[in-house]
Each structure stands twice: as C-alpha cells, then as structure tokens.
C-alpha cells in the first residue's frame, strides 16, 4: 500500500514538474502588442489536412480593430463571453461549472473557455482536449490580459475564428458569405457570422442548418438590443433583413461539380485587386455623434445604454 501511495505521489510530482517546465517554455505574448506583428500558424481543413495561415497585416483578409463593426465585436462578446470586459483571461465560475459537468458526464466536452483563452489556443496551442493543454491555455490567457488591451485580444480572436471550409477570420468570412468587406457588414450579417462560431463544421454549418443559424442570430440580435448596442429601430430593421446568402448556393453547386481546392488566405488576391485593410488599431469603436456620422475611435469599448422596456 505504501509503495502504491509513493508511486502516485511521485507521478503527481513528476507531472507538476512537467507542467511547470512547459509553462516556463511557453512563447512570449508581448510581441502580439506590435501592430505589425505577423506570424504563421497551421490550420486544419475539413479533410483533416494542415495548411499555413498568416496572422497579421500580411494576410489580405486581415481586418484591424478600427474596421471591425462595433456590432460584430459585441455580437461575439455577448454570445460567447459576456464577462469579457470583467475577467482577467479566465472565468473561475465557468471553469467550476465545466469541471462539475465533465465529472458528471465523465468526459471533457465542456471547456468554459473565454474569448482570451480561445485566442491563446488558436494562436499557440493544439486542439487536443487534455488537462495539460487547458492549463497552458489558462496561463497564456492570463499573460495576454497583462500584456494586451481587450481591443487587441478581440481583434486577434475575430481574425482567426473558423467560419467555413478553410475560411478563417471575419474578413474572409464576410467575403465568402456576403461578397463584401468586414467593415461593411450589417448588424444582421454580424449576428449571422457570430451565430456560426460554436460549430461551423456541423451544428451551426449554414450549408446544412441554415435555419438553426438564423434562429441563433435572432437570439444574438435580441442580446444586442437588450444591452443597448442596437436601438429599437435598428433592431427591428435587422430582424426584417434576410442575409443575402445566395453566394452559398453557388458555392454548393460548384463543390458538387468540382472537388474543392483549398488555398492559403495569406496569398495575394491579384485577380480581384484587393488590398489589405491597412494598419491595425488597438481600440474598440463605439458609435459617435460627430457630424460625419461615422464610428468614433474612443479607445474604449462601446458602452451600451439600458434598453427601453418593451410593451408586453
């Protein structure tokens, strides 16, 4: 019995040492604060093959913070991580609930990852579901919160999220689904893309479950209204709008007739004459009241006003 206990203790100590060394050897995150930061990661296509993916301004679809609609930012925050502006990288309560759920189900299905954790995972880690990877993810998320602004973190998050077959980032997603730049997205289109995030390959794949994606986008629009991101008139207009997803059917027809050829989104798009969106800004925008009627850069997240009570 004593030998068994000693063996367990030694295994635990060895594992803790391994985790400690792994954390010390984690890559620096301070470089991410540089607006010109560029790196290449590996992303997996829907056939399971890996492809290089460029992070930063050299990616033709890269959308700096100043060009991302406030509605897009708030759509993913309210749907994915409502406490984004309150936590320091990880949500202790959510982690406790996830551990309880996983123990009951005897699985590792619920991750309770914040937007910062998801960004850390996408930039630095694999997708394996292990305790070690989760510890690394939490550690990197905490460091990112110390080194970067919230605006910079959401910028990275939105430029790396998967939105379709080899479609990564809202810049590519906006072109792929709507034929426009991310800066031109309407509130309904922002909600549509945000609605896909939990499972663009299966549960919220608009090719297979368009109705489910639209239903979730309606829920996200309600959250935007409740938090004052959208006014009542804007909310009603967004609900009345049907996303122009006609391009999707064209792609489906093309895929049926010709096997897909995946290309890295970082290569130059000479045939369409597209140009990068420009330099990045480490700020989140809010709707301004200046005479131009354009978004005003305040350096702070938009502060939603309380929604007016609706008649029942």
Image (cartoon, rainbow, N blue to C red):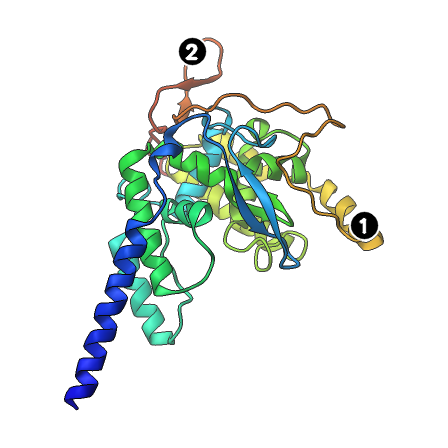
Front in this rendered view, residue 266 or 155: 266
What residue did someone put label 2 on?
A: 290
Residue drawn at 33 percent across, 46 percent down: 141
From where the camera sits, is residue 169 visible? no
Of the residues tagged 2 and 1, which is closer to the observer?
1
Quadrant of residue 101 within the rendered picture: bottom left
Q: Earlier in the sequence, mark 2 or mark 1?
A: 1
| On-image quarter of the N terminus | bottom left
User: In x, y percent, where is residue 299?
Assistant: 34, 22
187 sits left or right of 175 in the view: left
User: In x, y percent, where is residue 256?
Assistant: 81, 55
Query: Could you tell me if the residues under marks 2 and 1 are in contact, i.e. CB atoms within 8 Å?
Result: no
Residue drawn at 48 percent across, 48 percent down: 219
From where the camera sits, is residue 216 visible? yes
Residue drawn at 53 percent across, 28 percent down: 57
Residue pushed farthest top? Answer: 291
Classify 10 Å Cα crowding around label 2: few (below 14), some (14-19), many (20 and above). few
- Helix, strand or loop under label 1: helix
Say above or below: 45 vs 298. Answer: below
Say above or below: 63 vs 53. Answer: above
20 sits left or right of 290 in the view: left
Residue pushed farthest left? Answer: 2
167 sits left or right of 158 in the view: right
Classify 10 Å Cα crowding around label 1: few (below 14), some (14-19), many (20 and above). few
User: In x, y percent, where is residue 38?
Assistant: 49, 32
Give the spatial CA distance, label 2 vs label 1. Answer: 46 Å
Task: Find residue 253 and name its label.
Answer: 1
Residue drawn at 58 percent across, 34 percent down: 171
């Amino acid at each position: 019995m004593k030998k068994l206990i000693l063996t367990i203790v030694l295994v635990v100590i060895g594992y803790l040492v391994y985790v400690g060394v792994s954390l010390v050897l984690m890559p620096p995150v301070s470089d991410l604060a540089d607006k010109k930061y560029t790196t290449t990661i590996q992303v997996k296509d829907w056939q399971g093959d890996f492809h290089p993916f460029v992070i930063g301004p050299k990616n033709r679809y890269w959308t700096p913070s100043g060009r991302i609609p406030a509605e897009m930012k708030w759509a993913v925050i309210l749907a994915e991580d409502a406490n984004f502006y309150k936590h320091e990288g990880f949500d202790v309560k959510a982690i406790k609930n996830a551990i309880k759920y996983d123990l009951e189900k005897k699985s590792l299905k619920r991750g309770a990852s914040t937007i910062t954790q998801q960004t850390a995972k996408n930039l630095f880690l694999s997708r394996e579901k292990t305790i070690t990877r989760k510890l690394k993810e939490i550690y990197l998320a905490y460091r990112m919160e110390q080194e970067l602004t919230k605006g910079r973190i959401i910028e990275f998050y939105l430029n790396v999220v998967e939105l379709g077959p080899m479609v990564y980032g809202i810049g590519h997603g906006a072109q792929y689904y709507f034929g426009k730049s991310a800066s031109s997205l309407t509130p309904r289109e922002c909600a549509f893309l945000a609605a896909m995030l939990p499972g663009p390959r299966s549960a919220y794949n608009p090719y297979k479950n368009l109705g489910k994606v639209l239903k979730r986008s309606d829920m996200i629009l309600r959250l935007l209204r409740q938090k004052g991101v959208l006014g009542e008139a804007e909310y009603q207009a967004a609900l009345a709008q049907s996303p122009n997803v006609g391009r999707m059917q064209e792609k489906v027809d093309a895929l049926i007739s010709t096997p897909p050829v995946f290309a890295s989104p970082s290569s130059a798009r000479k045939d369409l004459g597209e140009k990068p969106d420009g330099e990045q800004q480490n700020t989140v925008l809010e709707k301004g009241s200046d005479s131009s009627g354009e978004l005003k850069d305040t350096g702070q997240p938009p502060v939603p006003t309380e929604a007016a009570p609706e008649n029942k």
